Amino acid sequence: MSRVLARAVVLLVFVAACSNGSNTSSNQSFSGTTIRVVTFTGPQIAEPLQRRAPDFEKATGAKVQIITVPFSDLYQKLLTDFATKTNSYDATVFDPQWMGDYVPPGYLEDLTDRVKNDSALQWNDIAPFFRDFSATFKGKVYTIPLDGDFQMVYYRKDLLQKDGLQPPATWDDYISIAQHFQGKDLNGDGKPDYGSCLAMKRSAQSYWAWISIAAAYLQSQGTKQGAFFNTDNMQPLTNNPAAAAALTVYKTLSKIGPPEQLNQDVGDSRGLFVTGRCALSLDWGDIGPLAVDKTQSTVQDKVGAIILPGSKKVLDRSSNQLVDCNATLCPYATNGVNHSPFAAFGGWSGAINKAASAKVKDAAFAFLSYMSQPAQSSVDVTIGKTGFNPYRTSHFNNMGPWTASGMSETAANDYLGAIKSSLQSPNMVLDLRIPQTAFYQQTALDTALAQFLAGEISLTQCMTQITNQWNSKTEEIGRASQLDAYRSSLSITK
């Protein structure tokens, strides 16, 4: 089927759905309506919104204006716009972690009834984790998931098989494999390449990489145990032997890779991996589709993906010591290894400004629904440049779009299998979602990690700095209220 014909078919299906009332917020003409949607400067995330907006306008009459700002500015721009009632934006595609700051003051529209009445959205097709975490705040739906975010490890299957190595089960394994390949020519161009490629640039969301490492040492009792704070008193889990072990791994990895690694963003590390210059990488789901993109990848069908490596030692919170896993401390361990897959970020999601006019809110919901519906999203999650990763059951069960994208069935099953392993883990680590999460992670944690990697502060100073700043912010906001918010995010009811 030609692209033109395929597009026409999608439009006809969408219009028919609207006219039949299966999308109640879209069964009217939106001619003359403009929806201002803000997200971060892409191309990731912004690209599919910009690409599909013209089709949506043809089908509904609504003009969609995509506004982009740097990721580091998005949280504050939204908060300021909401708080001052400037209302420059009608909708946003943002980090669902920030709902703790946006929902209680009444800035976001409650979408619960709209979701229930929108059959085209196929809400139950969205994986439970994303429905319950990314979309929901205290039992009500405020966002439409457009993306599924998990950190995974990617590895060069051909290189490991050639040298008789197994994919890393622990972070010690990861370091050993990275050291093995560091400095070797991995893509046949006669130049030395790298054992591991990580994005470690400050303000490049690199703190999630450290959390991905630390999670294996900090959380072993299941999701409700939490990996950021003690759920009894809101004391940070950032100054103990487990945090120290993770920082040591992180510092070691900063020295195994490109010489400019401390200044590299995710786009840089992905580019190096798909051009064959890295044996290992830690990233979201984007590398899977990028690795089969013939315009840039040289590692097609050479890439494996696995659940985050784990640790044989975990934090015993009663003694505050790092101890060997056992059946009591690590009930979900595999071969003595505690795996704690980390849902870093939680997946880009769409929300609507409660202050927007009724018709604009209807049009904005229709657009977000359109972006999330299987007909569109099943294609977008297979395209590396979108930044959208699988989040619907149909994304895992329907191999058609994946093979159509150029991914072999073996590669697709390998890639999706790593995500399934994370989704199905009872020890999933939920990303932080409390008021002023941006300060805890993007300011305090990110700054301390950058200083530590640069050698400006010691390991002990790093842990102390993070802990003191987190405690100070918690006291400023209110320890009791922050503890309640943290426990609620983990679905702790008693």
Image (cartoon, grey):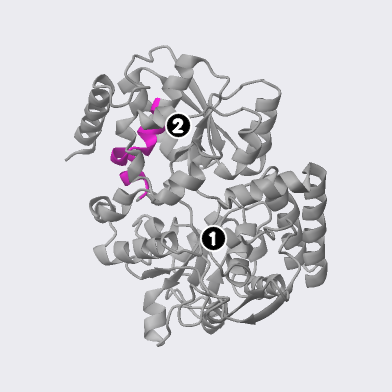
Q: Quadrant of the N terminus?
A: top left
As helix, strand or loop, the secondary structure at mark 1 comes to helix
At x 45%, y 73%, the residue is 189
Residue, far bottom:
164
Is residue 89 found inside the magenta-colored segment of the image? no
Kind of residue at disc 1: Thr
Q: Is residue 329 visible?
A: yes
Q: In this view, does 407 lie to the left or right of 40?
A: left
As helix, strand or loop, the secondary structure at mark 2 comes to helix
Q: Is residue 8 above or below residue 214?
A: above
At x 61%, y 52%, the residue is 494
Foreground residue among 376 and 160 = 376
The magenta span reads 366-381
At x 51%, y 81%, the residue is 177
Kind of residue at disc 2: Thr
Q: Callout 2: 10 Å neighbours few (<14), some, many (20+)?
A: some
Q: How far apart are marks 1 and 2 (CA)?
A: 25 Å
- Percent position (x, y) of residue 147? 44, 46
Dot label at residue 112: 2
At x 32%, y 26%, the residue is 23
Q: Name the residue under label 1.
A: 223
